[in-house]
Image: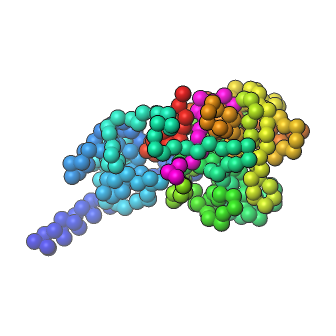
Amino acid sequence: MKLHQLAVLSVCVALAAALRVRRDDDDDDDIDLTPTGQTKACKTKDGRDGMCVHESMCTEDHVFQPGGIIDDSEIRLYLLRIGSCPGKWDWCCVFPNMTTTEPTATDRSKTDTGCRSGTKDSCPWCVGLYRDGGNPRTKSPSGLYCGGAIIGSKIVLTSASCVLGGKGSKLWVQLPGSDKHYTVNSTAKNTQFNSGTREHDTALLLLDEEVPWPEKQTGACLGLKTPLAGDCVAIGFDKKDQLVFTPMSVTSGSCTEQGSSYDAACGHTSGTCSVSSGSPVMCPSDGEGLIVAGLVRQNCVSNTAVLGSLVPSADWIRDELTKNAIAANRYSIIR
């Protein structure tokens, strides 16, 4: 009986090797977080109810894995070809307490867990984005070159320009004042991003491990319906990689012709102006303190900086977070 089982296994391995497929069409710099059958219900091989997701988000036992996994084995690739999901890289995956309907956005005040707002001098979920080899532009040996905001246990919001700026380098993020590095596993740029006008200049970073949060909080509150306007605070970094808070009066429209786009805004300050590309811009929201309404696009020139609103990128951000199984009430304020 054991010899028979061994023979069957040998045949399966040989067949899988013969049918091995290469991912030559994948982008080495981006992860495609778009499972073709995202809302399609499916059944695992042992009869469990699941949903079709990108195979990188699921374990061999068909259990959802936050942050994703890497498995290029011949057997796994072969099973993908004969699975019940329609997409080339889809995998039938079981989610804890999963329903077969897409998560519904709710107001975080009605839940036990939620995001955390900032203040004019506090940003607990702000991070610096680093690359190996240092930063040749600023000659910073630490490699700090952009900023971002943690919006979930393993997801960081930053600009697509920052992702392009780190292309070909090992990337990691770090909370100011901490020595802990969180390696960037993969990136996703907004599909509508225009590198010339900087339109839709948003991106998400997927970390290798979770960032611990106290009191069940899960990162920054996003104002996906909040106008980037009024008395806001933009984030930057000093020479010691510590946070700098710059109060800004923000109006719709670009400060300069360069990088002008319909989703741009202009921030002006009467004091010292220190902001970093990709860093969050926090604006007031009724009863919620300061929440992330935009990102820094260009550094200060004559006490002004070009900023970008999140509102036009809201659908893309929601879609990417949903595909990573981040519940809507854990990252956003919906009004």
Looking at the image, is 217 positioned above or below residue 302? Answer: below
Spot occupied by residue 2 in the image (x, y as percentages of width and height): 14, 73
From this viewpoint, which residue is outermost toward the bottom?
3
Quarter location, residue 286: top right
Q: Which residues are magenta?
A: 215-228
Q: Is residue 22 magenta?
A: no
- Image coords of residue 102 (percent x, y): 39, 35
- State the residue in front, 60 or 265: 265
Regarding residue 180, the answer to whether it shows in the image is: yes
Please name the residue shown 18% across and 65% down the image: 8
In-image side of 210 versus 85 (left or right)? right
Residue at 54% over, 55% down = 214
Q: Position of residue 244 (x, y in %)?
A: 77, 50
**In the rendered image of this protein, does residue 135 appear above or below residue 302?**
below
**Residue 227 part of the magenta-drawn span:** yes
Q: Position of residue 14 (x, y in %)?
A: 27, 63
Please state which of residues 331 and 56 is positioned toward the viewer in this rendering: 331
Counting labels gives 0
Comparing 80 with 198, the one in front is 198
Residue 103 sits in which quadrant? top left
Check the picture and name the quadrant holding the N terminus: bottom left
Farthest left residue in view: 1
Closer to the camera in the image, 50 or 176: 176
Q: Residue at x 69, y 58 (%)?
A: 176
Q: Is residue 170 above or below residue 149?
A: below
For the C terminus, the image quarter is top right
Q: Which color scheme does this rendered protein use?
A: rainbow
Residue 320 seen in render: no
Q: Residue at x 35, y 48 (%)?
A: 95
